[in-house]
Image (tube, rainbow, N blue to C red):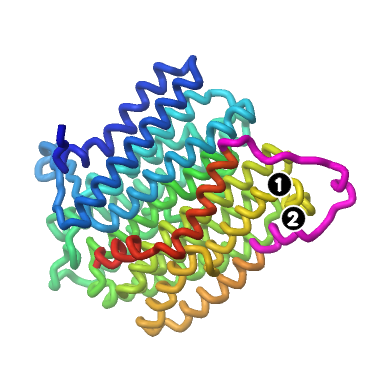
Amino acid sequence: MQLSPEMILLLTMLVPALAVFGILAAGRYPNLREGVTIAASVILIYLVSSLYVLVKNGASISLTSPDIFPGLALYFEIEPLGMLFSLVAGYLWLVTTVYAIGYMRDHHEENQTRFYACFAIAISSTMGISFAGNLFTLFIFYEVLTLSTYPLVTHAGTRKAKQGGRVYLGVLLTTSILFLLMAVIGTWHTAGTLDFTRGGVFSAETPHLVTGTLLVLFIFGIGKAAIMPFHRWLPAAMVAPTPVSALLHAVAVVKAGVFTVLKVCVYIFGLDLLQQLPSTDIMLYLAAATVLLASVVAMRQDNLKARLAYSTVSQLGYITVGALLATSMGVVGGAMHIAMHAFGKITLFFCAGAIMLAAHKTEISQMRGLGRQMPITMTAFFIGSLSIIGLPPAGGTWGKWFLLTGAFDSGKWIIMAVLMISTLLNIAYLLPIPLRAFFNSDSAQEDMTYKEAPLPSLIALSITALGCIGLFFFTQPLYQLALAIL
């Protein structure tokens, strides 16, 4: 039976949601439960790949519900930025599931059924965010993503996990209600529409004081983008298991944040209007400060996951900078960095979890000589580091290149300097880890033999590391999607 494009679009959101019932029903049978998750993720890959082919061939696909409020309905529409985000999240769900099977079993985690069920809900809401055709729809799925990931953050059930969950939920809900909801209501009142529109929705007569204020509310309200000072939820959430960290940093949560920033800047304000608003520069330099300050804090962390968490705060700043540069190359660079950072950072978190499982080490100072016992893991870590830094032959090179080009096009020399200095800081806090692991020896560990992580986890981190390299050499499809956003 030939599915219509609209049905395929609907199924991208329904398949992960329906998988939840299968996961819960198979909860007593781990193999069946994980089989349901893998089957759903494979189907999702087929669906988003089918949508990509349709979009590439020029199809226009949309879906509308009956009005929920007068004049407001759930509206879904496929556009290039959403297509890019859905491909990243769809493919990485399968890889993260494979990793989680090895990690959760080997670590003897409790409540694994709840973990897989909440993960599926999070992916379903991520698909809703990807294809949201208006701010109303995006806001609803954005909040569902927050609520569905809270049980994952508090998965361990310890006092520390519960405290981390409170910070996570508190910051994200507070920013959404106080700022983002007000920005959505203000946009509706001012523009009379919430639909994402090429060139923006505000008329030329709208006072810049109004649109500038709305921009500030949006940037602060999209707490998942982790702009300082609303970034504390991200390090606090590191109490979660490593597969959850991968979900937070690469597959869904933070990417939903910066995706929303890009979508709002391009389709609600429009680049022409952004260039005219004084508040654009204020937010731009705040994002640039986040890039540098988070990098400096990352350098001071000895705990590997904490260092990676602050690295993520910094890297998200890159994408926000790209959006606020209000140039075509800035937007292209920001969009490409969503995918590049996803593969690089998920690799690093996979490796951090593998090290904890196999060697029971969480502190960087303990990892001297570890590369000799875990060569596959530390090689993958090195490749992921190259991608985050932006060095060939890793895909992160292209995202940073276009961001620098966007800063050059706009004449923002300070932003160019920030991007270059941040890259040096990336080198300083990432490269010493694999170098210490391979070339430094620890006499206390010389007679100790470690093994690699469980095979499913090892396969997953190897795939994402190869993905980092593949994105360097085969970046044209991604570039074409990013270019089509404009």
Which amino acid, mark 2? Ala
Q: Is residue 370 left or right of residue 201?
A: right
- Residue 19: quarter of image: top left
Is there CB contact under 8 Å for labels 1 and 2? Answer: yes
Specify the label residue 374 is tagged with. Answer: 1
Q: Is residue 73 visible?
A: no
Which quadrant, please, contains the N terminus? Answer: top left
Task: Please give the name of the residue rendered at 42% of the width and 62% of the height, measured from the top-left corner.
Answer: 337
* Residue 486, position as x, y percentages in the image: 24, 68
Q: Identify the residue at horizontal 70%, vertical 62% (top origin).
A: 432
The secondary element bearing badge 1 is classed as: loop
Q: Amino acid at mark 1?
A: Met
Residue extent of the magenta highlight: 430-456
- Nearer to us in this view, 70 or 301: 301
Depth check, mark 1 against mark 2: the one in front is 1
* Vertical position of residue 473 compared to residue 19: above or below: below
Does the segment drawn in magenta span residue 469? Answer: no
Q: Which residue is mark 2?
A: 437
